[in-house]
C-alpha cells in the first residue's frame, strides 16, 4: 500500500518579514549575513504533533500480527546511569521532570499498547519478557542525529547480564523506529553497541538490527536540505563564535533542518536554539515558543502547492530517465528507505508513469520534461580511487617486436610474476595472459611487402653492405 507523504509546515517570506520576534533574532547578524539567515529559515521543515503521531501509529500498526513486540521510548540517560534495568529486571523509572521529545513518544506508546489487544507491551520488565518469550523489541525515537543517544540506550539495556545473554544467543531482534535519521548514523550505531559484527560470527549484530524511518538523508548532501546557497549558510553558522563550536553546525555536525512541534533536535544549527549571555536563539531551550506555533498555523504548508504532482515522484522519474533503475540506488539518491522506493515505483506504475520494466512511459516522459529543472536531486560523486596495483602494465600488453627479447620474456614469465601483486606464486591474470598468449596477427611485426618480379638492387636482406 502506498504510504502518504508527510505535510511539512514552512515559514513564508511574509511571516519572516512581519514577525517582530524573527526580526529581533535577525538583528544579531550583520547586514551582509541577514539575507542568508532568512534563506536558512525558509528551508526549515516543521513537523506537527498530529503528523508525527499518525506516522508512528501507521508504522507500528503495519508490524506483522504473528509476533508480540516490546515497545520502548528512547531517552537520554543520566551521566552516572549505565544500565536500563535494575538487578531485579525492572526498568529504571523515568524522572518526574520533562524529558523533551521522549514525553510525547512515551504517551503514544501507552496509547498503542491499550489498543493492541496484547500485541504490544509497554516497557516490560525482564520477567515479563521471559514469561512470554519476547524476541522483538521496538525502540522509538522522533529523530536520530549522530546516533550517540540510541547507542548509549542499547548499551544500557545490554548492561544487564540476562539481556546480554539473549543478545549473544541471537534471541533479540531490535527495530529502531525514528521519523528521520542520517544514513551515516546506521554504521555509527552498530559500531558503538556491544558485540561483534565479524563475518564469521553466527549472529552478527548488524543482522539483529532493523532501521525504519520516514526520511533518510546523507549528512554531506547539504543542497537537498538547504538549497543551492548551502555554502553561505554553513559559513554563517561557523562564523558565530558566541556559540560553542560543537553546536554551530548542530550536534555531530549533522546540520539537520527538521523541527518537531514537541521538541527541537540539537542536531539543528546552533544559531536557531542556542542561548547564553551573548546569543539568543530563535527557539531557546530547544522548544518552540507559542508565538512561533501561531505563526506556523497561519503559514501555508510546503506540500500544498505540489499536491497534484509530488516532487518526490518527479525526482524518481528524473532519475529513471537518467538510467538509474535499481531500487537500492534510487533509495540512496532520494534519501529514503528501500521499502518506500518499492512502494513509490509501484505507485508510479499504477499512474502509468512507469511500465513494468521500470521504463518511462510517454506520459511519464512528458511529466519529466514539463517539471521544474531544479528538483534538488543530489549530484552523485562519480570519482573513484583505483589503486595503481590494479592496473595492468600497458607496456607488457603488446608483445615486444624484438624476437630474441620476446622469447626471453616468455621463458622467464615465472620470474617476472614475482613482481606482480596477488598471493605468493600467483601473477596478475591480465599480465600473464598478455605475456603467455600468442600475439594477434594485427600486432605482430611484419616485413614490408615487395613485388616478386621486382629486382632488388640492394640484394637480399641481410647481405653485406656494398
Image (cartoon, grey):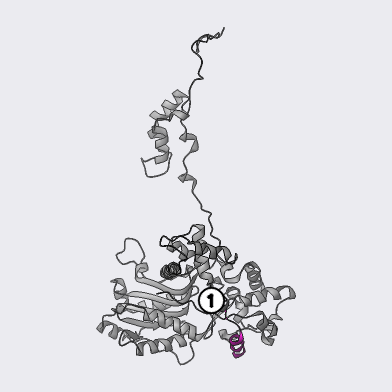
Q: Nearer the viewer, residue 99 or 331?
A: 331
Q: Nearer the viewer, residue 90 or 131?
A: 131
Left or right relative to 17: residue 269: left
Q: Quadrant of the C terminus?
A: top right
Left or right relative to 47: residue 33: right
Residue 281: x percent and y percent?
Answer: 63, 82
- The correct choice, above or below, for 457 with respect to 319 in the image is above
Q: Residue furthest top?
A: 466
Question: Which residue sits at x=42%, y=43%?
Answer: 421
- Magenta span main SS: helix
Q: Nearer the viewer, residue 292 or 339?
A: 339
Residue 143: x percent and y percent?
Answer: 48, 78
Give the residues in magenta.
Answer: 289-303
Residue 231: x percent and y percent?
Answer: 64, 67
Q: Quadrant of the N terminus?
A: bottom left
Q: Nearer the viewer, residue 3 or 29?
A: 3
- The correct choice, above or below, for 114 with respect to 264 in the image is below
* Residue identifier under label 1: 307
Q: How many marks?
A: 1
Question: Which residue sits at x=53%, y=60%?
Answer: 380
Q: Quadrant of residue 195?
A: bottom left
Decide whether residue 433 is among the magenta residues. no
Q: Quadrant of residue 327?
A: bottom left
Question: Which residue sits at x=42%, y=77%?
Answer: 177
- The correct choice, above or below, for 403 with respect to 126 in the image is above
Q: Residues within 10 Å of mark 1 (few under 14, many from 20)?
A: few
Amino acid at each position: 500500500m502506498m504510504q502518504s507523504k508527510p505535510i511539512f509546515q514552512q515559514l513564508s517570506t511574509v511571516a519572516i518579514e512581519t514577525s517582530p520576534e524573527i526580526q529581533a533574532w535577525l538583528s544579531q547578524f550583520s547586514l551582509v549575513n541577514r539575507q542568508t539567515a532568512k534563506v536558512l529559515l525558509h528551508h526549515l521543515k516543521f513537523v506537527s504533533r498530529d503528523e508525527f503521531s499518525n506516522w508512528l501509529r501507521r508504522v507500528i500498526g503495519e508490524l506483522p500480527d504473528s509476533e508480540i513486540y516490546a515497545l520502548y521510548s528512547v531517552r537520554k540517560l543520566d551521566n552516572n546511569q549505565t544500565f536500563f534495568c535494575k538487578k531485579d529486571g525492572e526498568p529504571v523509572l523515568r524522572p518526574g521532570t520533562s524529558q523533551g521529545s521522549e514525553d510525547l513518544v512515551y504517551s503514544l506508546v501507552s496509547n498503542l499498547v491499550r489498543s493492541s489487544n496484547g500485541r504490544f507491551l509497554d516497557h516490560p520488565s525482564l520477567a515479563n519478557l521471559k514469561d512470554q518469550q519476547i524476541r522483538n523489541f521496538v525502540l522509538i525515537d522522533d529523530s536520530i542525529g549522530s546516533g550517540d543517544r540510541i547507542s548509549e540506550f542499547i548499551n544500557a539495556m545490554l548492561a544487564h547480564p540476562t539481556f546480554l545473554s539473549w543478545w549473544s544467543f541471537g534471541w533479540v531482534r531490535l527495530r529502531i523506529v525514528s521519523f528521520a535519521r542520517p544514513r551515516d548514523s546506521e554504521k555509527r550505531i552498530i559500531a558503538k553497541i556491544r558485540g561483534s559484527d565479524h563475518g564469521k560470527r553466527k549472529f552478527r549484530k548488524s543482522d539483529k538490527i532493523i532501521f525504519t524511518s520516514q526520511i533518510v538523508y546523507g549528512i554531506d548532501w547539504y543542497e537537498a536540505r538547504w538549497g543551492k546557497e548551502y555554502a553561505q549558510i554553513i559559513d554563517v553558522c561557523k562564523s558565530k563564535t558566541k556559540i560553542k563550536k560543537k553546536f554551530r553546525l548542530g550536534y555531530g555536525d549533522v546540520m539537520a533542518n527538521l523541527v518537531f512541534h514537541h521538541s527541537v533536535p540539537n542536531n539543528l544549527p546552533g544559531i536557531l536554539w542556542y542561548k547564553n549571555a551573548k546569543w539568543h536563539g530563535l527557539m531557546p531551550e530547544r522548544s518552540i515558543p507559542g508565538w512561533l506555533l501561531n505563526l506556523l498555523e497561519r503559514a501555508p504548508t510546503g506540500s500544498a502547492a505540489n499536491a497534484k504532482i509530488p516532487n518526490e515522484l518527479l525526482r524518481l522519474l528524473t532519475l529513471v530517465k537518467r538510467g538509474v533503475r535499481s531500487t537500492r540506488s534510487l533509495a540512496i539518491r532520494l534519501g529514503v528507505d528501500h521499502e518506500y522506493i518499492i512502494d513509490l515505483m509501484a505507485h508510479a506504475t499504477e499512474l502509468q508513469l512507469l511500465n513494468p520494466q521500470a521504463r518511462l512511459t510517454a506520459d511519464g516522459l512528458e511529466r519529466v520534461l514539463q517539471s521544474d529543472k531544479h528538483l534538488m536531486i543530489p549530484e552523485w560523486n562519480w570519482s573513484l580511487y583505483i589503486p595503481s596495483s590494479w592496473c595492468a602494465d600497458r607496456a607488457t600488453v603488446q608483445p615486444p617486436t624484438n624476437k630474441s627479447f620476446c622469447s626471453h620474456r616468455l621463458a622467464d614469465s615465472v620470474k617476472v610474476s614475482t613482481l606482480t601483486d596477488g598471493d605468493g606464486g600467483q601473477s596478475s591474470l591480465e599480465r600473464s595472459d598478455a605475456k603467455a598468449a600468442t600475439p594477434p596477427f594485427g600486432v605482430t611485426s611484419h616485413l614490408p611487402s615487395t613485388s616478386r618480379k621486382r629486382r632488388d638492387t640492394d640484394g637480399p636482406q641481410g647481405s653485406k653492405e656494398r
